[in-house]
Image (cartoon, rainbow, N blue to C red):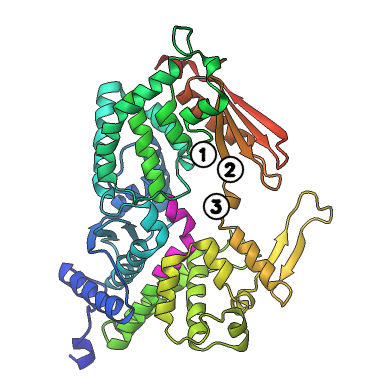
Amino acid sequence: MTEANSSRLFEGADWDFATLQRIHDACEDVALIELGLDVYPNQIEVITAEQMLDAYSSIGMPLFYKHWSFGKHFAHQESFYRKGLMGLAYEIVINSSPCISYLMEENTATMQTLVIAHAAFGHNHFFKNNYLFKQWTDAAGILDYLTFSKNYIARCEERYGQAAVERTLDAAHALMSHGVNRYPGKRRPDLREEEQRERERRAYEEQAFNDLWRTVPTGPGKTIKELSIDRRRELLGLPQENILYFLEKSAPRLQSWQRELLRIVRHVAQYFYPQGQTKVMNEGTATYVHYKIMNRLHDQGGIGDGDFLEFIKAHTNVVFQPQFDDPRYSGFNPYALGFEMMQDVERIVVSPTAEDREWFPDIAGVGDPMSVLRDIWANYRDESFVSQFLSPHLMRRMSMFHLSDDPDETRGLVVQAIHDERGYRRIRRQLARQYDIGWIDPNIEIIDVDLAGDRRLLLRHSVVHGSLLDEANAKQVLQHLADLWTYDVLLQEVDAQDTVIKEHLATPRAVAMAA
């Protein structure tokens, strides 16, 4: 055996748990000592392809509660996988402490090395250090909370029936994207304390809630007319953009277990909220880290040339970016864009051009790329990352341009900007906007409840640039909202001048009223 072979982490495609330990330790040395990463403790678990499919189907959370939609997704994914129409990702990683990385047992030793470098160190570092995850997720409490929610929902099915629980979960899932707080509170979320605090607070809240609704019938107390509009809205916490939170606190006919289900779905939605804003950065960070670690292991002789070629093939597939006229094109691949931008930042920091020094005076030529990248990974999200660090050099290399498809434009598709001196800032601004949740997510708020009349719930959608809600989707989601509220729901779409452009009305179904 040669000296190089004696330092190899593995030979061939086979692996065992001792091999995984050696791989993990070698990756850890590079990640912590050479790249300066800061990670949660790692927990590596090996699962089968079927278990990976199962985890896929429950939005990537193996400890998630049961719901019929997860089974439907599982059957769909399994059918495509068995027919060879789709492949599986090689890993799933959980934002928790310890950080759990699931590896498929079918992976070769090289792929296990790639996954450990990518997930156990790249994603792990990003989860622990990015400000959005710090503000919105509780890494130490999420696993216990998922176990609690799974057991709680199972008990509800036994006590209240599977159909009733599924109806509530169906409605909550339909409103999941409107169940998050967009603005951080003073404290980091603590799901363990949340459980206890919510139970203690419930008695007081229900009492206050009952006081509010006791004013609706006539009686010796204060009448509804005495409640001013402002006071009424204050009691109900209006306006409110977190629809699930409002229903959990104020829906008049929900039972306590249904409110608990809404809270569970709301907490899960909040947990995933940062991931939707950091897809490019999160995947770009993990891809950049695995590329660095794998190259370093190859330089050290830890993996052979054949294994390195296997890695390069897999890495190239991950960062493949089809051109705009390719039938496979569906926008920017977040792995490709993120990885290219991370490498471009490294280039600017180490060997900048005159153009780079003009565009990025704070980082051009400072000479410590990992320090700059760690700062970016900690303090930016996709929209701000693209708007501040997409360089003219990369725009030219990726041949970026901006197309406008305005329905009012009679000339059809218009090329608004290309990658030249006049177009750089416009292209960067437009691409950054595609990741801005304030631009792409509809701004919908609950603004009032007609307590004096038929208790109709009134919502407002502030229309941006004429983008109205899809009629069919709006109808379905409003139906679920009306079922939970148990009275009519009216959604008005208004323009910047507060003119009502369109209205959607939903009435609760009989089965919801009878629940």
- Three-letter residue code for mark 1: Glu
Q: Give the distance between the C-alpha atoms of the residues marked 2 and 1, in whole angstroms.
A: 8 Å
* Label pair 2/1, CB-CB below 8 angstroms: yes
In this view, the residue farthest toward the top is 219
Where the C terminus falls, by quadrant?
Answer: top left
Please tell me how crowded label 1 is: few (under 14), some (14-19), or many (20+) other residues with Cα within 10 Å: many
Q: What element carries label 1?
A: loop
Rendered position, 277 above or below 219? below
Q: Name the residue under label 2.
A: 443
Discs 3/1, front: 1
- Height in image: 119 above or below 276? below
Residue closer to the observer: 203 or 137: 203
Give the numbered dot on residue 437: 3
Check the image and report above or below for 138 versus 425: above
* Horizontal side of residue 293 vs 346, given as left or right: left
Residue 453 painted magenta: no
Mark 3 → mark 1, Cα distance in angstroms: 14 Å
Q: What residue type is labelled 2?
A: Asn
Residue 13 location, x and y as percent? 26, 73
Residue 78 in sight in this render: no
Residue at numbered disc 1:
241
Magenta span: 273-286
